[in-house]
Image (cartoon, rainbow, N blue to C red):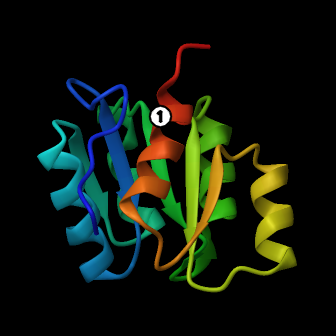
């Protein structure tokens, strides 16, 4: 990953990452914290949903394929509780189903693994831009 800072910077911004791949979680956490984002990571949707009442993330980064559910289903569970923040989906298998799911979920971006830091930070800039 090429750690190039985003235009907006991460100071004070809080990003939640839900991905069952430990290496991906650690890489994203390292990159984002190096750019002054606050980061919380979760290995599955259940642990995220259990913790969400105490969290106010500015953005979610969700893996499409999680244990026992998709990232789209997880976002639906969150939306049943409260409006979700802007969401970026990541996937190891980009196909029409993932594209349709991301579109239906009104995702900021759908990134195929492995993605570059530049792609991720561009998506974060869009997610965190004033609305």
Question: From what the image shows, is residue 83 above or below residue 51?
Answer: above
In front: 114, or 99?
Answer: 114
In front: 32, or 14?
Answer: 32
Question: From what the image shows, is residue 38 above or below residue 61?
Answer: above
Residue 48 image position (x, y, % from top left):
39, 55
Identify the element where label 1 is drawn. helix
In front: 127, or 21?
Answer: 127
Say which residue appears at 76% left-offset and 49% top-offset.
105
Say which residue appears at 16% left-offset and 36% top-offset.
36
The quadrant of the image that shows the N terminus is bottom left
Specify the farthest residue to the top: 131
The quadrant of the image that shows the C terminus is top right
Q: Is residue 85 visible?
A: no
Question: From what the image shows, is residue 124 above or below residue 8?
Answer: below
Say which residue appears at 42% left-offset and 66% top-offset.
116
Residue 59 image position (x, y, % from top left):
45, 38
Q: Residues within 10 Å of mark 1 (few under 14, many from 20)?
A: some
Q: Which residue is mark 1?
A: 125
Residue 50 image position (x, y, % from top left):
37, 52
Q: Taking 101 as reference, is 59 left or right?
A: left
Question: From what the image shows, is residue 93 above or below residue 29?
Answer: below
Hey, which quadrant is residue 120 in on the image?
Answer: bottom left
**Number of marks present in the image shown:** 1
Hey, which quadrant is residue 84 in on the image?
Answer: top right
In front: 78, or 85?
Answer: 85
Q: Is residue 1 visible?
A: yes
Say which residue appears at 65% left-offset and 40% top-offset.
79
């Amino acid at each position: 990953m090429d750690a190039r800072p985003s235009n907006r910077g991460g100071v004070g911004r809080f990003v939640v990452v839900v991905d069952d791949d430990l290496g991906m979680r650690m890489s994203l956490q390292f990159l984002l914290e190096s750019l002054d984002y606050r980061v919380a990571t979760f290995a599955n949707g259940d642990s995220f949903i259990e913790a969400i009442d105490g969290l106010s993330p500015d953005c979610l980064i969700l893996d499409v394929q999680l244990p026992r559910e998709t990232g789209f289903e997880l976002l639906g569970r969150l939306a049943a509780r409260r409006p979700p923040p802007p969401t970026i989906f990541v996937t190891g298998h980009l196909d029409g189903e993932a594209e349709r799911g991301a579109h239906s979920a009104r995702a900021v971006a759908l990134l195929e693994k492995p993605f570059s830091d530049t792609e991720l930070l561009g998506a974060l800039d869009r997610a965190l831009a004033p609305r």
